[in-house]
Amino acid sequence: MKKLLVFGFIGLMVVSCKPTMDTKSQLGLKGNWTLTSITHIGGEYVKVNSFNIADAHCFEGSQWKFVSNNNSGSLSLNKGGDCPHFESSFKWTVTPNSDFEFKFIDEGVKAKHVTTGYKMKVKNQSANSFELVDKFYAGGQSYDVTYHFERN
C-alpha cells in the first residue's frame, strides 16, 4: 500500500510538471489553412529564408494542416518557379503566452528525437485567420516577419 501511494505521488508530480498549452488557441488552429501573404521590413530588398527552406515569399500559397488532438501537422510548398517543392510533417503546440512552437519531423523519425525547431508568436487569431510573427536579425537589429493565414 505504501509503494502504491509513493508511485501515485511521483506520477502526480510528473504530470503536474508538464508544460501547459493554450488549448483555446490550439483548437482554433485545427484544420486546413493557406499561408496567403508574408510581410516584413525591407520588402523585396531584404531576403528572409523561412525555416531554413526557402525565401519567405516561396511560402505564399503553401498549404498547412493542423491537427490539435495529437499536435501534428503537415506543410506543402508548391509555388514553382525558383521556389523548391517541399512537403513535411511537423509537431506543434501553442503555449499559454501565445508562443507557437513547431518542429519538422522526417518520415520514420520520432518527434522526441528531433531537438531543433522554431518559435513564433500567434497574433490576431479569429475563426478564419491568424498570423504567426517571427523575428529575424539584420544589421544588429531585430525585425518581424508576419505570416498571414486564411482558413480553407
Image (tube, helix red, strand yellow):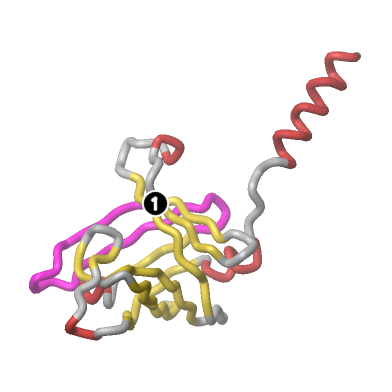
The part of the chain drawn in magenta is 67-90
- Residue at the extreme left of the image, as rendered: 81
The answer to whether residue 36 is left or right of residue 133 is left
Residue 96: x and y, percent? 64, 62
Residue at the image point whose x is 39% and y is 69% from the top: 135
Residue at the image point whose x is 51% and y is 53% from the top: 71
7 w.r.t. 84: above or below: above
Residue 93: x and y, percent? 53, 56
Residue at the image point whose x is 44% and y is 55% from the top: 102
The answer to whether residue 28 is left or right of residue 31 is right
For disc 1, the neighbor class at 10 Å (few under 14, some 14 to 19, many from 20) is: some
Indicate the secondary structure of the residue bearing disc 1.
loop
36 w.r.t. 64: above or below: below
- Residue at the extreme front of the image, as rendered: 140
The answer to whether residue 95 is left or right of residue 6 is left
The N terminus is located in which quarter? top right
Residue 127: x and y, percent? 56, 80
The answer to whether residue 81 is magenta is: yes
Foreground pick, 136 / 10? 136
Residue type, label 1: Gly
Foreground pick, 8 / 121? 121
79 w.r.t. 118: above or below: below
Q: Which residue bears the numbered disc 1? A: 117
Rendering quarter of residue 95: bottom right
Residue at the image point whose x is 20% and y is 64% from the top: 54
Rendering quarter of residue 23: bottom right
The answer to whether residue 137 is left or right of residue 71 is left
The answer to whether residue 66 is magenta is: no
Rendering quarter of residue 152: bottom left
124 w.r.t. 115: above or below: below
